[in-house]
């Protein structure tokens, strides 16, 4: 009799247990995507966004949250919908296209002459003090010259939760794209 009550209680508890939902996040790409012309022989200057690289701790599926000056937590149930480096490259192309309307910005080279941009992201996480960090460096190969600049944005996260974290990370990434665009414009 007691054995049956124990088994029944265990089954009841197992039936009442809740499952944790997994949520997937994608960086917002903005309200409109710039049109891309790929005419042969076009004299429109081109920037090839060759690569956006991230360190191993950011390369996994989980969003990253810094809980102290030395401790990072990678979310198990709040995941990137596609690899972060791909999302960063795609949104960088979109943001640069908007910021540099006189240039063709693409993730694949078009034609023989183009500037080449590589970005190394070293920080892309929320932080224990309510701030969001977007940091790293970019390297532009322009007419045989190399231009290297760092970026380090710390933005306040105005709301709680992963939705707000992703939106604030996207804002920091847009500011990074604007900094790169300003650097490109200064070259001419």
Image (cartoon, rainbow, N blue to C red):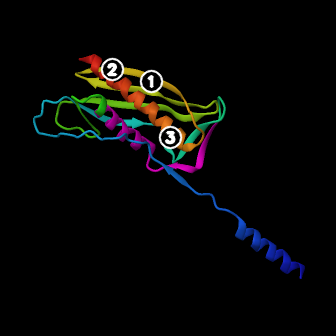
- Residue 61 % position (x, y): 51, 48
**Which residue is at the far right?**
2
Q: Which residue is mark 2?
A: 183
Mark 1 / mark 3, whichever is N-terminal: 1
Left or right: residue 77 compared with residue 87: right
Left or right: residue 133 compared with residue 118: right
Q: Is residue 2 above or below residue 131?
A: below
Magenta residue check for 24 = no
The local crowd at label 2, few if under 14, some if 14 to 19, many if 20 or more residues have their Cα within 10 Å, is some
Mark 3 / mark 2, whichever is N-terminal: 3
User: How many angstroms separate mark 1 from mark 2 (CA)?
Assistant: 12 Å
Q: Which residue is mark 3?
A: 166
- Residue 23 % position (x, y): 54, 53
Q: Quadrant of the N terminus?
A: bottom right
Task: Report if the CB atoms under discs 1 and 2 are less than 8 Å apart.
Answer: no
User: Which element is circle 2 on?
Assistant: helix
- Residue 122 % position (x, y): 49, 31
The local crowd at label 3, few if under 14, some if 14 to 19, many if 20 or more residues have their Cα within 10 Å, is many
User: How many angstroms separate mark 1 from mark 3 (CA)?
Assistant: 19 Å
State the residue at coordinates (89%, 78%).
Answer: 2
Task: Between residue 133 and residue 83, name the one nearer to us.
Answer: 133
User: How many angstroms separate mark 3 from mark 2 (CA)?
Assistant: 26 Å
Magenta residue check for 89 = yes
- Residue 49 % position (x, y): 31, 35
Left or right: residue 14 compared with residue 98: right
The span shown in magenta is: 72-97
Q: Which residue is mark 1?
A: 151
């Amino acid at each position: 009799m007691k054995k049956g009550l124990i088994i029944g209680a265990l089954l009841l508890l197992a039936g009442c247990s809740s499952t944790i939902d997994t949520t997937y996040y994608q960086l917002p790409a903005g309200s409109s995507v710039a049109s891309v012309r790929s005419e042969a022989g076009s004299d429109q200057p081109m920037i090839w966004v060759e690569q956006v690289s991230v360190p191993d701790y950011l390369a996994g599926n989980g969003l990253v949250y810094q809980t102290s000056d030395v401790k990072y937590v990678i979310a198990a149930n709040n995941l990137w919908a596609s690899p972060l480096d791909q999302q960063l490259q795609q949104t960088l192309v979109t943001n640069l296209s908007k910021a540099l309307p006189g240039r063709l910005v693409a993730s694949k080279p078009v034609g023989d002459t183009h500037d080449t941009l590589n970005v190394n992201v070293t920080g892309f996480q929320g932080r224990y003090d309510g701030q969001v960090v977007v940091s790293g460096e970019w390297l532009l190969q322009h007419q045989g010259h190399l231009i290297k600049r760092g970026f380090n944005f710390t933005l306040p996260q105005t709301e709680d939760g992963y939705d707000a974290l992703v939106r604030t990370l996207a804002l920091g990434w847009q500011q990074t794209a604007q900094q790169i665009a300003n650097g490109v414009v200064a070259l001419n």
